[in-house]
Amino acid sequence: MITQSVVSENRGHEGYWIAFLCALILVSGALLLPFNRTHDDHHTLAKHQVFIDDLTPSPLAMIADLRLAHEEIRYLYETNQTWPDVVQLEESWLAPFVKDKSWEHRGQHQWLLVAPGVYQSEPIESGTRYLLNSQGQTVDIWLDKDQQASLLHALTSIESNSIDLSVAQFISAGWIQVIFNNEVEDTAHHH
C-alpha cells in the first residue's frame, strides 16, 4: 500500500476560510431572521363580540343549526321574496325551529320573527338566548348568555320587508356577536 500526503497550496488556510464562511452565513441568517417571518396580527374584538372558539360546547350545537338555517331562510326569501315566519320554518322541519328531541335538549327555545329576516329565541327555562340575523348574505348570529340583553320586540307588521335592525341596535340592547374565524379580517375593518 502506498501512502502519499498532499500538501495544500496555501498550507491549510482553507479550513479558516470555510469556518469564516460558515460563521458569515450564521451571522447573516441571524440578522435577517426577524425580517423573514410571517406576521400574525392579533385581532382584538370589540366588547360586543366573541370568537366562536371561545364558546363552550353547549351553544356550539345551536350555532351550527343556526348557520344551516340561515342558508335555508335565505333560499326561501330569494324564492318567495318574503321572509318565512317561525311557523313556516317549523313546518319545514328546519332546526332549531322544529320542536323535536334536539329542541328539548337545547332548552326548548320559542322563536319570534322580530324584523324581516331577524329571528330571536327565548328559552322556556333559563339559558342562552340567540338571535339570527339573516338579512345579509353572510350569517350573523348574536347571543345573550346571561339573559341580560334587552329583548327585541316583534314588530306588528312583518310584511314590510324594509324594516332593518342595525348592528348598533343589537349592541345597545346588550347582545354579543359571534365571530367566526373567517370573519376576523372583516370585523377588524368594519367595527
Image: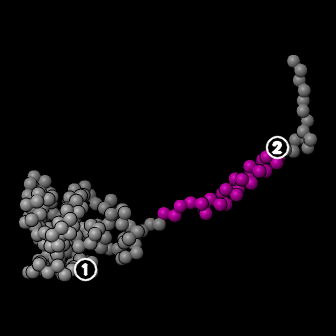
Along the line of sight, which residue is nearer the eye, 82 or 34? 82
Dividing the picture into quarters, in which one does residue 167 lie? bottom left
Closer to the chain start, of discs 2 and 1, is: 2
Q: Residues within 10 Å of mark 1 (few under 14, many from 20)?
A: few
Residue 27 highlighted magenta (yes or no): yes
- Pinpoint residue 108: horizontal percent, then vertical percent: 10, 60
| Residue 108 to residue 4: above or below | below
Query: For residue 166, which numbered disc appears in the image?
Result: 1
User: Residue farthest to the top?
Assistant: 1
| Residue 162 to residue 108: above or below | below
Q: Nearer the viewer, mark 2 or mark 1?
A: 1
- Pinpoint residue 30: horizontal percent, then vertical percent: 66, 57
The residue identified by callout 2 is 15
Residue sitting at x 10%, y 52%:
101
Q: How many angstroms separate mark 2 from mark 1 (CA)?
A: 73 Å
Q: Quadrant of the C terminus?
A: bottom left
The answer to whether residue 143 is seen in the rendering is no
Task: Tell me which segment is drawn in magenta.
Answer: 15-40
Q: Quadrant of the N terminus?
A: top right
Disc 2 residue type?
Gly
Question: What is the secondary structure assignment of the residue under circle 2?
Answer: helix
Q: Is residue 139 left or right of residue 150?
A: right
Question: What is the secondary structure assignment of the residue under circle 1?
Answer: loop
Residue sitting at x 78%, y 47%:
19
